[in-house]
């Protein structure tokens, strides 16, 4: 895994932080020990998108405590998904007391196209994810935080990861919290001890080692 980390540093811009993306070079899953998405045959076919991101209309109430961070939710054209549902789901995750707002250091509000925003959360096809994440290497299978945007790879949103096998809902919560966490300035973390909850800033898409999968920055006793 040290070799993989070095590869990202080579491709990162000068002054950029390597933990800002959940990206690594494309090596075979078997050789690199990387966790492939858990996909059905239909989902495994890379979907076609327009390459153009569309801001979802509407807004949410303010959630959390601390300085307000307004954000846009974007969905790539051509993706078959209820955009308003996706936008609501993103805000439900960020508004949860177990998410970043629970730290009392930040609050969130989703706004529509007419308002300026501090950051964006985008759902994009693998090809568009690669473009938006560049110069980080997402290889069509990872997500990233780059340029003020949390880019969620549609392949992962639909297929999850091995650490969350059978719990796609939990993985989606992790994906939003992890990438937004990067935009808030949080770097990658590692499994602290066997049997412990994995930190949300651990690269859980690639596995959790001896830790337990955890999608929240501030998990409760019930998960």
Image (cartoon, helix red, strand yellow):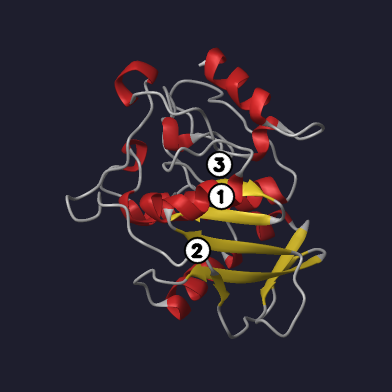
Q: Earlier in the sequence, mark 2 or mark 3?
A: 2
In the image, taking residue 211 as reference, residue 43 lies left or right, namely left
Residue at x 65% of width, y 82% of height:
112
Residue at x 25% of width, y 54% of height:
43
Query: x, y (%) of residue 196?
Result: 48, 29
Residue at x 55% of width, y 41% of height:
200
Residue at x 43% of width, y 43% of height:
140
Residue lying at the far top in this picture: please name it: 3
In the image, taking residue 11 as reference, residue 84 lies left or right, namely left
Pointers 2 and 3 in contact (C-beta within 8 Å): no
Q: Nearer the viewer, residue 129 or 18?
A: 129
Q: Nearer the viewer, mark 3 or mark 1?
A: 1
Pointers 1 and 2 in contact (C-beta within 8 Å): yes
The residues tagged by marks 3 and 1 sit, at their Cα atoms, a distance apart of 25 Å
Question: Where does label 2 land, which residue?
Answer: 51
Q: Nearer the viewer, mark 2 or mark 3?
A: 2
Q: Visible in this render: residue 184?
A: yes
Query: x, y (%) of residue 74?
Result: 56, 69
Circle 2 residues within 10 Å: few <14, some 14–19, many ≥20: some
Residue 103 position (above or below residue 85): above
SS for callout 1: helix
SS for callout 2: loop
Q: Nearer the viewer, residue 67 or 144?
A: 144
Question: Where does label 1 land, which residue?
Answer: 131
Question: Where does label 3 land, which residue?
Answer: 200
The residues tagged by marks 1 and 2 sit, at their Cα atoms, a distance apart of 9 Å
Q: Visible in this render: residue 170?
A: no
Q: Earlier in the sequence, mark 3 or mark 1?
A: 1
Circle 1 residues within 10 Å: few <14, some 14–19, many ≥20: some
The residues tagged by marks 2 and 3 sit, at their Cα atoms, a distance apart of 29 Å
């Amino acid at each position: 895994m040290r070799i993989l980390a070095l590869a990202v540093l080579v491709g990162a811009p000068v002054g950029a932080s390597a933990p800002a993306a959940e990206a690594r070079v494309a090596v075979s899953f078997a050789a690199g020990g990387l966790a492939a998405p858990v996909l059905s045959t239909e989902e495994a076919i890379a979907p076609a998108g327009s390459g153009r991101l569309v801001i979802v209309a509407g807004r949410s109430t303010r959630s959390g405590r601390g300085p307000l961070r307004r954000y846009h939710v974007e969905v790539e054209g051509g993706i078959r998904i209820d955009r308003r549902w996706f936008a609501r789901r993103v805000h439900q995750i960020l508004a949860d007391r177990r998410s970043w707002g629970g730290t009392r250091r930040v609050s969130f509000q989703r706004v529509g196209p007419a308002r300026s925003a501090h950051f964006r959360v985008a759902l994009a096809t693998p090809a568009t994810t690669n473009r938006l994440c560049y110069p980080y290497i997402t290889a069509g299978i990872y997500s990233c935080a780059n340029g003020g945007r949390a880019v969620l790879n549609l392949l992962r949103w639909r297929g999850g990861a091995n650490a969350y096998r059978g719990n796609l809902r939990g993985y989606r919560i992790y994906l939003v919290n992890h990438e937004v966490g990067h935009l808030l300035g949080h770097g990658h973390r590692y499994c602290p001890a066997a049997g412990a909850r994995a930190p949300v800033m651990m690269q859980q898409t690639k596995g959790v080692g001896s830790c337990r999968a955890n999608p929240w920055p501030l998990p409760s006793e019930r998960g």
